[in-house]
Image (tube, grey):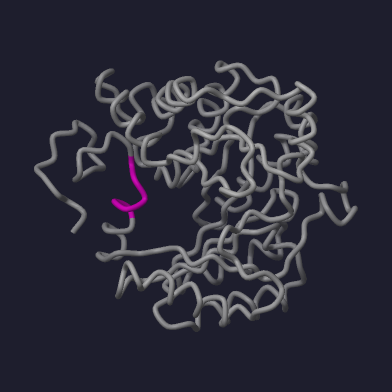
Amino acid sequence: MIQTEPNKSPFPFSVDNKRYHTLSYHFQKTFGCRVEKAVVDAGFTCPNIDGTCGTGGCSFCLNGSGGFAQSGVFSVTQQLQMEADRIYKKRNGAKLIAYFQSHSNTYGDLDMLKKIYNEALSFPNVVGLSIGTRPDCIDEENAGLIADFSKKAYVTVELGLQTIHDETAKRFNRGYGFCEFLRAFRLLKEKNIRVCVHIINGLYGETQEDMVKTAFVLGKLRPDAVKIHLLHILKGTKAQQQFEAGELTPMKKDRYIDTVCRQLAYLPPECVIERLTGDGIKDKLIAPRWSLDKISVLAGIDRELCLRGAVQGEFF
């Protein structure tokens, strides 16, 4: 069980005093046991890298975001075995979700997608898939395939939005507009597919009100889950060049905590908050360095919510 003391939080989706809908709570209620994500790199690329809609990717992208993924060299099964070995050292007996994280994991022909997803689901203790992708890599055919998989396993499509503001998106070379996100999101929901939407705070020139508005608009769509990230400036990215030229200012820690607390108020209570801050790659992270202390950031969010008497969805 995840409960460690009597629950005193007024938030209904909690047994551990959290004031937002945690992923651990969701997994416990869904599976009745500990569940961990096993990161897999299946060798996909991205239409914003290969020239289909652009090159170079988003300006903050390091050509794939999987911190533990074993790209290119190992099969899906081999990667899952390595991830299982890593996870079981701390969480022996946990169930696994194969997390296709790097690049756009619906950007391929249907036969290849089917083969890769089946290989992951055939690995021992894998109970589901998380499929990271872009809205412009979702169509009727692959959405139908994912819908078929979701009938026999726990499946989530992790859909990149980052911001609802298209002017911001142009600044970091996202390569699609908000209307394209809406098309893909609605197609997936029409097929009863679980969707987790990613947003990023601290993007190019955005005010706090811009970031809160992204959460407000997203909340009205009622996604199944949301991941809230902080913009990380990484070595080797265009964002590094922009930062060094004074064109990009990292968020301060207290500003980030305040922004997240405000955003949570506009997300529906039943929406699972799968992440409240991203994991920066330690040897690649230029700024903000405070984000490396993830425990401190999460504790700061918990403390601020408590001080405000606030809970997720209070303004929804």
How many tags in the picture? Answer: 0
Task: Relative to 35, say whether 182 is above or below.
Answer: above
Q: Residue furthest right?
A: 51
Of 221 and 176, nearer the camera is 176
132 horizontally vs 216: left or right: right
Seen at 52% across and 51% down, the residue is: 195
Percent from the top left, x then y, of residue 205?
A: 69, 20
Q: Quadrant of residue 234?
A: top right
Which residue appears at 37% of the width and 41% of the height?
295
Q: Is residue 50 above or below residue 10?
A: below
Quarter of the C terminus within the rendering: top left
Q: Which is nearer the eye, 242 or 48?
A: 242
Q: Quadrant of residue 180?
A: top right
Image coords of residue 275 (percent x, y): 45, 44
Inspect the magenta stretch and tell me whether residue 43 lies in it.
no
Q: Residue at x 48, y 70 (%)?
A: 151
Quadrant location of the N terminus in the rendered image: bottom left
> Magenta region: which residues?
21-26
Residue 25 falls inside the magenta stretch? yes
Determine the residue located farthest toward the front in the rendered image: 283
In this picture, is 248 found above or below 229? above
Residue at the (53%, 64%) spot, across then down = 99
Q: Give the prevailing secondary structure in the magenta stretch.
A: helix
Q: Which residue is more in the foreground, 238 or 10?
A: 238
Q: Position of residue 248 (x, y in %)?
A: 71, 24
* Horizontal relation, residue 261 to residue 107: left or right: left
- Tell whether 53 sits left or right of 80: right
**Residue found at the far left of this picture:** 6
Q: Position of residue 225 (x, y in %)?
A: 46, 46
**Residue 50 horizontal side relative to residue 124, left or right:** right
